[in-house]
Image: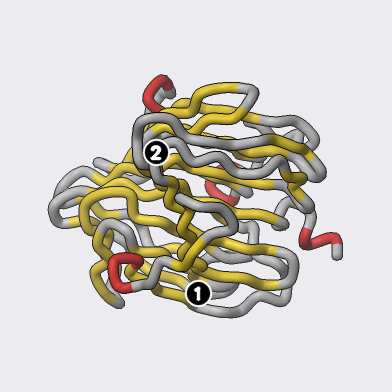
Amino acid sequence: MIRTDYSKKEVVNTANEKQHNSPSDGVTRIYLERDDGGEYAVATSIVKFNANSHFTKHTHDKGEEIFVLDGIFSDEFGDYPMGTYIRNPDGSSHSPFSNNGCTIFVKLRQFHNKDQNRIIKNTHNEQWLPGLVDGLSVMPLYEFNTEHVALVKWMPHTHFTTHKHFGGEEIFVIKGVFYDEYGTYPQGTWLRSPHESIHTPYTKEEETIIFVKTGHLFQNET
């Protein structure tokens, strides 16, 4: 069991984490959260595919969510370059691989039990929308029930208002450095904040982009 107490805040700098071998040669994983289900675990991971590596065909019980961090991720249905957001619903299956290597952020078996949507979005083709404060831009990626998923771009020296996370908040820092009153979170940092936690985030000198999920940490109970 790895970081499965959702009442606690978790912060992981993936640059300092161990790579674990997967059942497929050339595919390794950094565990961010994982229950004791083995290869059928409820899990969030950073998965690295070396060039010309393949993962075995598998079925997505309770769904699979992917954001491509670098390289080109592929399966028998297509090629997904860096910046692609994918949702494979419960019962879907595929045989993933990468010809030239890639790194992906993956969440397994965490879909709402009524969510059956398959989504593929190349974020390079999506529009940034104005955020709630100056210097902030938002790219909505998906929403279902209480769950909201987006990319958020912060210009340097942007400050957001103090806010509460209804249903929790999960962040992966894609670019730059993200801050709040509790710490500093460079590129590659994963954060999970529990239901009704509060913070006041901001940036300093660097433009920063974060992948954000909110409202999802208790959604299957609603």
Q: Which mark is residue 207?
A: none
Q: Earlier in the sequence, mark 1 or mark 2?
A: 1
Based on the displayed image, in which of its 4 quarters is residue 76 positioned?
Answer: bottom left
Instruction: Give the vertical position of 208 relative to 92 (above or below).
Output: above
On the question of residue 30 being in view, the answer is no
> In the structure shown, which secondary structural element does the residue marked by tag 1 occupy?
loop
Decide which of 10, 116 is in the foreground and name it. 10
On the question of residue 164 being in view, the answer is yes
Instruction: Give the vertical position of 93 relative to 5 (above or below).
Output: below
> What amino acid type should be assigned to the residue bearing mark 2?
Pro
Looking at the image, is mark 1 or mark 2 nearer the viewer?
2
Residue drawn at point x = 57 percent, y = 65 percent: 63
Decide which of 109, 66 is in the foreground and name it. 66
Instruction: Give the vertical position of 170 relative to 54 (above or below).
Output: above
Quadrant of the rendering where the C terminus is positioned: bottom right
Quick one: which residue is furthest to the right in this view?
A: 222
> What amino acid type should be assigned to the residue bearing mark 1?
Ser
Q: Residues within 10 Å of mark 2 (few under 14, many from 20)?
A: some
Residue 40: image location, x then y, percent: 58, 51
Q: Which residue is mark 2?
A: 156
Decide which of 27, 47 is in the foreground and name it. 47
Q: Which residue is mark 1?
A: 92
